[in-house]
Amino acid sequence: MEIVLEEEKKKEMIQLLWKCEDKGGFSKMAVVICQTCGGSLILTNKGWRHKDGSLIKQRCENCGWYGGGEKPFSKCPKCGSGELRDDHMVEVVWVK
């Protein structure tokens, strides 16, 4: 599967080299992005998250807010509307 990203996202990916240790103790370098949005991912003690720390991304149909958290919000943090729609969850892609 080939992933096509905008030039801006490609530059961001190149800057995101993460040093990850496997169980054998050796290190390898990889670029880690979200397959859905192409955004930056960070490794936390709870696993991979978007750069803002969120696992789930949502959109508000009422005010246009876009963001997320560890768990889905039931109401928009900006306007309080219950018209939130799930956008996507973190989907890890390792780019060599």
Image (cartoon, rainbow, N blue to C red):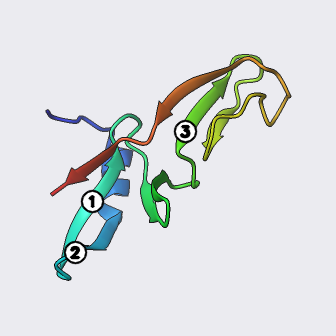
In three-dimensional space, the C-alpha distance between marks 2 and 1, rounded to whole angstroms, equals: 19 Å
Look at label 3 and name its amino acid.
Answer: Ile
- Circle nearer the viewer, 3 or 1: 3
Q: Residue at x 44, y 61 (%)?
A: 42
In three-dimensional space, the C-alpha distance between marks 3 and 1, rounded to whole angstroms, equals: 20 Å
Seen from the viewer's position, the closer of residues 12 and 90 is 90
Residue at image mark 2: 23
Mark 2 or mark 3, which is nearer the start of the sequence?
A: 2
- Circle nearer the viewer, 2 or 1: 2
Is residue 72 rendered to the left or right of residue 13?
right
Residue 22 horizontal/vertical position (percent): 22, 72
Residue 77 sits in quarter: top right
Residue 60 horizontal/vertical position (percent): 70, 23
Q: Residue at x 85, y 29 (%)?
A: 79
Q: Residue furthest bottom?
A: 25
Label 2's element?
loop
Mark 1 or mark 2, which is nearer the start of the sequence?
A: 2
Residue at image mark 1: 31
Is 74 placed above or below 62 here? below
Is 69 placed above or below 79 here? below
Mark 1 or mark 3, which is nearer the start of the sequence?
A: 1
Q: Residues within 10 Å of mark 2 (few under 14, many from 20)?
A: few
- Circle nearer the viewer, 3 or 2: 2
Q: Residues within 10 Å of mark 3 (few under 14, many from 20)?
A: some
Q: Residue at x 77, y 30 (%)?
A: 76
Looking at the rendering, in which quadrant would you find the N terminus? top left
Q: Which mark is residue 56?
A: 3
